[in-house]
Image (spheres, coloured by chain):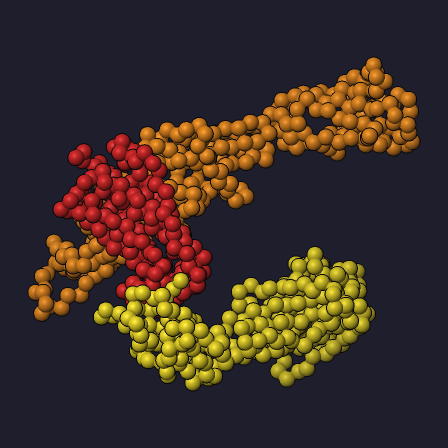
Chain colours: A orange, B yellow, C red
Amino acid sequence: ESCGHIRLSAPAVRLGDPVVASCTISTHCSKLDREPQILWRLDDGPNQPGDRQQHLPDGTQESIITLPHVNHTKTFLFCLVPWTNSFQILDQAELQAGYPPASPSNLSCLMYLTTNSLVCQWEPGPETHLPTNFTLKSVRSRADCQYQKDSSILDCVPEDGQKSCSIPRKHLLLYQNMVIWVQAENVLGISKSPKLCLDPMDVVKLEPPTLRALDISPDLVPQQPGCLWLSWKPWEPSDFMDQKCELRYQPQLRGTNWTLVSHLPSREDQFKLCGLLQALVYTLQIRCIRSPLPGLWSSWSPGLQLRP
Amino acid sequence: ESCGHIRLSAPAVRLGDPVVASCTISTHCSKLDREPQILWRLDDGPNQPGDRQQHLPDGTQESIITLPHVNHTKTFLFCLVPWTNSFQILDQAELQAGYPPASPSNLSCLMYLTTNSLVCQWEPGPETHLPTNFTLKSVRSRADCQYQKDSSILDCVPEDGQKSCSIPRKHLLLYQNMVIWVQAENVLGISKSPKLCLDPMDVVKLEPPTLRALDISPDLVPQQPGCLWLSWKPWEPSDFMDQKCELRYQPQLRGTNWTLVSHLPSREDQFKLCGLLQALVYTLQIRCIRSPLPGLWSSWSPGLQLRP
Amino acid sequence: PVPLPQSFLLKSLEQVRRIQGRNSVLLEQLCAAYRLCHPQELVLLGHSLGIPQAPLNCCSRQALQLTKCLSQLHSGLFLYQGLLQALAGISSEVGPTLDMLLLDVANFATTIWQQMESLGVVPTVQPTQSTMPTFTSAFQRRAGGVLATAHLQSFLERAHCALDRLA
């Protein structure tokens, strides 16, 4: 049984809040004088007496100190007594200070067809100065995004410090809705992000098709001035998905706008684009989206430079 | 119970060796004619009859085929019978061919103070064409490198295809001898490398010290023509080891040799090197070795270019 | 009969195409790894191993019965899920593809079941897996894999036709 023991009103408080500490010295502490003066020290600070020291009914000595504003995120509190010509530390307590976690925000998810995993990311909110654990929680739900209280909730724990988490394929029920949220927790509290309800297949991260120029030999098809022959095929992993695409083109001239051709199929072996000015070099790009089922636009394909 | 069953004289043979295969068709194979002609196929080759087909006492049909020289490292052998207007595969056997492993050679080990692991590497020997497992085996031994037969042997399995293995610190008894060898094994045999007996601390991979020029201000020490002031300190992780070092220097002139200064300490705050020609730029390098205890020379430090 | 919702049909068609794609990859891998490239050469073995094929007659153009068609779709997927599970551990080359295929088939079966629930035509008794073939050799497991995958491919083609007609 150690000689001294520190008790804190709370192991962690909000930055700036007060904390009360008590240090009691048990009677059987033989090596000490009968009623030693109990002293306190914060980290490397000076030894200072408590606010008051009293004799408890059971014979133990107790010193109480109040720290009005804890303004360090981590403080070591020492309880000491004078001994011969030095001081002896009897106990040490670690006091943490910070903020309860704010609700994580901007939760968004993408389904990657290459890794077959759903990756969600979020904004953690302001610094809490305390060890704070983020957990991505998900649960299968009915079409109306309701789920039984007892349905099993999957925890996805991000890698250290990451603000995203990847749910592997074996935990995903594709083509069904699931409810997803982030929980943040530290010693001062717990908070939850707003809930998302989605079918992973509706948030597929789609890559654009590969756009190519076709060099149609003149004897096959009469050359038409101001026309280009193009072909494209969908990004291979998304081949099974019905998609619609749009093509945009713009001459390499300062100040010209893009011209858009919409409602194109995701696979085109021979596409003739006319109405172009022969002298100019055009930049062409294409992008697609899952359709008619819900989906997200892919990015634009890398620019293809062609002269009609 | 399936209709047909292939037996091989051996699942694996040396490249070029013969193999004998038999395929027996059980009597309860109702769907087949009474005495179907048993055929063989190698990989995508043609269907061919066996050397001979016979009726066994228990009523089963057996076809035997001899492959005089197996010259593919992996062959699929099929046993088929004609059925309606096609052929039916009754069984398939996988025949491997290659060589038993030669003894691994050039086994050498280095102790890395940064990772605290002993890394051993070896030459695997000629290609065996068969899945061959290499295992680095080690056992604690007495000073005379003998060890009891029942002492526990540690297996270090290299990462796929690697010809080295790293024994972590917790499996090493430093300052004691251990016996180390490599075992290679495949379906055709087992081989062992010659044994090494070493104390990991005697094969430390030492890094050279950091060599620096001292600019001693003239008023402190009278400038002496043709002299350089140097300082060096040992590579930090090897600081606890007694080492001796040697310095070499050479003017940047074609055809000049290195001059060597031996038996230097591993730490020198002020070292005066004289006898140099003032007009020339010299390249200086230093290396060290654990001493007097056994050790390996570090590499030479990067060249330091100085003009006396 | 009650028309099926467009989103269900579109999702089902997409899932069929997804599974067909992965299924043909598995067939290619089994062919490349074991030279078992012609399922028609394994018919006899299939009989002796008892590799079942799932019926889809109620989805045919001539005899379409919507509720029974959905039920046959679900039972067929459930059967092939069992068959594919019996192939687990077949080899490291095809393992990953097999695992993904299993998940896709299971998810598609759930899509069908959910739709049957919405239509209130869920059979009173939950489907139980019929006895699966047992493989006594690596060859039987590989050959069983080729046959099961080939049967699943033809099942999916018929399912695609039926769903296409309904969409």
Residue B64 placed where, x, y %?
40, 80
- At 49% from the left edge and 76% from the top edge, which residue is drawn? B10
Q: Is residue C29 left or right of residue A134?
A: left
Q: Residue B83, relative to residue C51: is it above or below?
A: below
Q: Is residue C149 left or right of residue A273?
A: right
Residue C108 visible from this viewpoint: no
The quarter in which the C terminus of chain A is drawn is bottom left
Q: Is residue B200 left or right of residue B88?
A: right
Instruction: Single out the residue that lies furthest toward the top.
Output: A57
- At 61% from the left edge and 26% from the top edge, which residue is drawn? A15
Label tally: 0
Residue B180 visible from this viewpoint: yes
Q: Quadrant of residue A66?
A: top right
Q: Nearer the viewer, residue A30 or C64?
A: C64
Residue A124 placed where, x, y %?
48, 35
Residue B140 placed where, x, y %?
75, 65
Q: Nearer the viewer, residue A143 or B263?
A: A143
Q: Residue A27, relative to residue C104: is it above or below?
A: above
Q: Is residue B129 left or right of residue A263?
A: right
Residue B51 placed where, x, y %?
37, 83
Q: Residue A234, relative to residue A92: is it above or below?
A: below
The quarter in which the N terminus of chain A is drawn is top right
Q: Nearer the viewer, residue A111 or B224?
A: A111
- At 28% from the left edge and 50% from the top edge, which residue is drawn? C54
- At 36% from the left edge and 63% from the top edge, which residue is drawn? C143
